[in-house]
Amino acid sequence: MGSEDKEFPFTKAKISGLPLPKPGERARYYDTKSKGLCLRVASGGSKSFTYYRKIGGKVYSKKIGEFPSCTIERARVEVDKINGAIAQGKNPLEQALSATSETTLGELFDQYIKQYAADRCSTANDMVDNFNRYFGEWRSRPLSSFKRIDIQARINKLGADGKKHTANRSHDLIRAVFSWGIKKGLFAGENPCIGVDKFKLQARERFIRPEEFKAFFKALAAENKPDDDKLHNNFHDYVLLSLYTGARQANVLSMRWEDVDFKTGHWRIPKTKNKDSHTVPLTPYAVDILKCRKDKAKTNGPTPYVFPSDSAVGHYTEPKVAWRHLLKNAKLIDLRMHDLRRTMGSYMAMNNQSLPIIGKALGHKSHVSTQIYARLALDPVRAAMVQAQEQMLGAAQLEEKGDE
């Protein structure tokens, strides 16, 4: 239903025929006969009449009754009473707004995204998806109804389902929403997320190991067929550039030609997950792939993206199906696309590169993110220790021969 259909004269037939919103969402409709009469439709099927008006920059809301037990006529009478009192300067909703008239979690989250995250967080779209997925059923709950035990129970449930990382990230998201609301004066209570226990996680260390590369590259080569469409070739080159640059998935997918400098051999990422720009040195292997794609782009028409597609965003999006197909053919287990980035860092560590160099190559803002490679950096140290020990043992043998 389009925006032009959000307002109409309420009738029992029209209300009964309204479509249900998507799971976790709700819809509002307004009566054109009684100002302030709003019908809220939940994804579960419930429909309720509410007084909903913005007066002097402040939103007033009061639940009137559930449809159809509460009739349209009765709802209009209640709304007219409130409007009449307001017209006389006596707002019955001004004092101690009830829980049903408070700002809801869904309303606060929408404001958080619109007024803050949309322009400041590169993962704003993921935030919306994750909020609707894990907290969607809480959208209509008033902010004051949340207690620490509610948040803890939800985080525990997510963790019990084997999603401990997701549980922690979900906690961080909803805590940030409450904190922002308190800071902006949209909620006067305490943040119910403070004091909630998160899960202790072991840093993921998976990367492509030396014995796995042969099968990996063989399976990947099979994905690069000359007669395939551009999306299929996108996958092959995307995987290689992710491996060769060590850049984050979102940055590789949205790579633009204007940010690639073939003369200096650099790729400038305008905005990373850390909200900073990052310049990636392009190796000859990466340059070869980009030049080949650039030549194809000239013949297939201009495009701002290195990996163009017909998606809503205009560039290639996360190729989950193709990735699963690749792993199946390569017979690799528990390898994620983000592990391509970790593979670059791991092999740099095994080649005795310092942690600051690795951090700079991967665009880490904090040295903490680079510490995962410290263990791998010990392999060259071990080799040096073995060499020293062999010299010591060799010297001991020579000394023994001299004593004979």
Image (cartoon, rainbow, N blue to C red):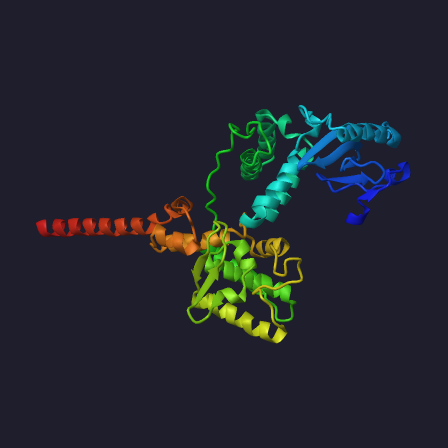
- Position above or below: 208 against 171: below
Counting from the top left corner in percent of width and height, residue 72 is at 87, 32
| Front in this rendered view, residue 45 or 242 | 45
Residue pushed farthest front? Answer: 88
Q: Position of residue 74 (x, y in %)?
A: 86, 28
Task: Specify whether 364 is left or right of 404.
Answer: right
Query: As displayed, is residue 306 above or below residue 94?
Result: below
In depth, the one of 274 and 265 nearer the eye is 274
| Horizontal arrangement in the rendering, residue 125 relative to residue 215 (left or right) | right
Q: Quadrant of residue 168?
A: top right
Residue at 55 percent across and 27 percent down: it is 190
Q: Which residue lies furthest to the left in this view?
A: 403
Taking the image as drawn, is residue 247 in sight?
Answer: yes
Residue placed at 63% from the left, 67% from the top? 230
Q: Closest to the observer: 312 or 94?
A: 94
The residue sitting at 85% across, 31% down in the picture is 76
* Residue with the most extreme bottom position: 299
Whether residue 223 is visible here, answered yes or no, is no
Compared with 129, 294 (above or below) is below
279 left or right of 292 in image: left
| Total tally of numbered discs in the picture | 0
The picture places residue 400, in percent across and down from the top left corner, at 13, 49
Give coordinates of residue 327: x percent, y percent. Answer: 57, 54
At horizontal 76% and vertical 39% (from top left) the residue drawn is: 28
- Which of the two residues, 222 or 106, is positioned nearer the viewer here? 106
